[in-house]
Image: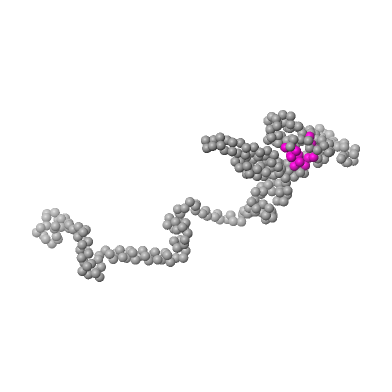
C-alpha cells in the first residue's frame, strides 16, 4: 500500500499515489469502533438518510391529514385510482364526461301526458305514427295469428328462433299487420304487436259491414278470395280470416282458400285483399260516369 507523503517510495507512475487499497469491511469496522467510543458522535452519511426519512414522514402525515384524500376513504376503487394516477385497476370503465349544451334538449322516457300508462316508453313511436293518446293506443285490439319456431344447426349447437305474426285493429275500419323474429318468443310477440299498431291502414267498407264486390289475391302458392255478402250473412271464413275481419269491423263476408293453406301466406294475402279493394268512385271517375247507389235511391237509404 502506498500512502501520500512518502516521496521516496512513489513510483514513476504519478497516478499511483491516488490508489488507496481499503475494503468495505474495514470501513464498517472503523465506523462501529468509533460509535462505541463516542455514542453521541454523528457518523458521516447517516445525517443525510435521517433528513430523507424526516421529509418522507412529513409528507405522509400531511397526506393523511387531508379529508378528501382517497387513501383515507374506505372505497377500494378510489384507492386504486389514486395509486394508478386516476386510471383504476377495476373492470369498470371510467365515467364519461357530460357534453355541454345538451341538458334540457331531450325529454325523459316517460311522457307526463301518458298518466303513467307507458312507463317504459315503448309506445312512443306508435303514438307519433298514429297521432293517438296513450288511452286510445291501449284500446286497440291485437291478436296473434301465426307463431312458428325454427331451429338452425350451427357448430355451436342448435339455435332456436321464433317468428310471430300479429294483427291489430280498432274494429272500426282500421287494420294493421306486424311480423317479427327473435330468439325469444316474448320479444318477438311484443315487437310484432308494436309493428302491427304502427302499420295500421284504413279498410274500405260498404255500409260499414262488408267489402266492395269480390277481391282475390295470390301470394306464392296461396290464393285468398273474399266476397261481399248481404246483411245478416255473418263471417263464413277460416279462423284466421275471421279474426282479421272482426278487428277491421267487417260483419258480413264470405271467403275461400282454394289452394295452399300456408298460415303466413294466408294472412298476408288476406291483408293485401282487404287493403286493395276496388273503389267504385274511382272506377266511375275513370270511365267518366256518375255513380249512384240504386238501393239507397229506391229504398230511401233504408237498406237493412
Q: Nearer the viewer, residue 59 or 263?
A: 263
Residue 85 position by quadrant: bottom left
**In the rendered structure, which segment of residues is drawn in magenta?**
240-254
Q: Position of residue 244 (x, y in %)?
A: 74, 39
Q: What kind of colouring is applied to the model shown?
A: one colour
| Image vertical order of residue 292 relative to residue 90, above or below | above
Viewer can see residue 128? no
Q: Nearer the viewer, residue 154 or 205?
A: 154
Quadrant of the snapshot with the N terminus: bottom left
Q: Position of residue 203 (x, y in %)?
A: 76, 40
Q: Position of residue 225 (x, y in %)?
A: 75, 32
Q: Is residue 146 magenta?
A: no
Q: Residue at x 77, y 42 (%)?
A: 249
Q: Position of residue 78 (x, y in %)?
A: 47, 58
Q: Residue at x 14, y 61 (%)?
A: 4
**For this view, does 223 lie left or right of residue 48?**
right
Q: Is residue 250 magenta?
A: yes
Q: Residue at x 76, y 32 (%)?
A: 256
Q: Residue at x 70, y 30 (%)?
A: 260
Quadrant of the snapshot with the C terminus: top right
Residue 16 position by quadrant: bottom left
Residue 153 position by quadrant: top right
Q: Residue furthest left?
A: 8
Q: Is most of the magenta stretch helix, strand or loop?
A: helix
Amino acid at each position: 500500500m502506498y500512502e501520500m507523503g512518502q516521496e521516496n517510495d512513489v513510483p514513476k507512475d504519478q497516478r499511483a499515489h491516488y490508489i488507496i487499497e481499503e475494503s468495505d469491511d474495514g470501513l464498517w469496522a472503523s465506523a462501529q469502533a468509533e460509535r462505541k467510543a463516542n455514542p453521541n458522535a454523528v457518523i458521516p452519511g447517516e445525517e443525510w438518510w435521517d433528513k430523507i426519512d424526516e421529509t418522507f414522514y412529513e409528507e405522509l402525515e400531511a397526506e393523511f391529514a387531508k379529508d378528501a384524500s382517497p387513501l383515507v376513504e374506505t372505497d377500494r376503487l378510489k384507492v386504486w385510482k389514486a395509486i394508478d394516477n386516476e386510471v383504476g385497476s377495476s373492470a369498470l370503465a371510467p365515467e364519461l364526461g357530460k357534453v355541454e349544451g345538451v341538458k334540457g334538449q331531450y325529454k325523459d322516457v316517460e311522457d307526463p301526458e301518458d298518466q303513467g300508462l307507458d312507463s317504459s316508453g315503448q309506445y312512443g313511436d306508435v303514438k307519433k305514427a298514429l297521432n293517438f293518446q296513450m288511452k286510445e293506443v291501449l284500446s286497440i285490439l291485437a291478436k296473434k295469428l301465426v307463431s312458428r319456431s325454427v331451429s338452425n344447426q350451427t357448430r355451436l349447437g342448435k339455435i332456436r328462433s321464433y317468428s310471430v305474426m300479429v294483427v291489430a285493429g280498432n274494429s272500426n275500419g282500421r287494420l294493421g299487420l306486424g311480423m317479427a323474429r327473435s330468439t325469444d318468443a316474448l320479444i318477438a310477440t311484443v315487437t310484432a304487436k308494436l309493428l302491427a299498431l304502427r302499420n295500421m291502414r284504413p279498410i274500405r267498407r260498404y255500409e260499414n259491414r262488408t267489402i266492395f264486390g269480390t277481391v282475390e289475391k295470390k301470394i306464392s302458392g296461396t290464393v285468398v278470395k273474399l266476397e261481399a255478402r248481404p246483411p245478416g250473412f255473418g263471417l263464413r271464413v277460416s279462423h284466421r280470416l275471421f279474426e282479421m275481419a272482426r278487428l277491421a269491423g267487417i260483419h258480413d263476408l264470405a271467403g275461400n282458400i282454394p289452394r295452399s293453406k300456408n298460415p303466413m301466406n294466408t294472412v298476408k294475402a288476406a291483408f293485401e285483399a282487404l287493403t286493395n279493394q276496388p273503389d267504385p268512385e274511382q272506377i266511375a271517375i275513370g270511365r267518366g260516369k256518375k255513380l249512384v247507389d240504386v238501393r239507397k235511391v229506391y229504398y230511401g237509404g233504408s237498406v237493412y
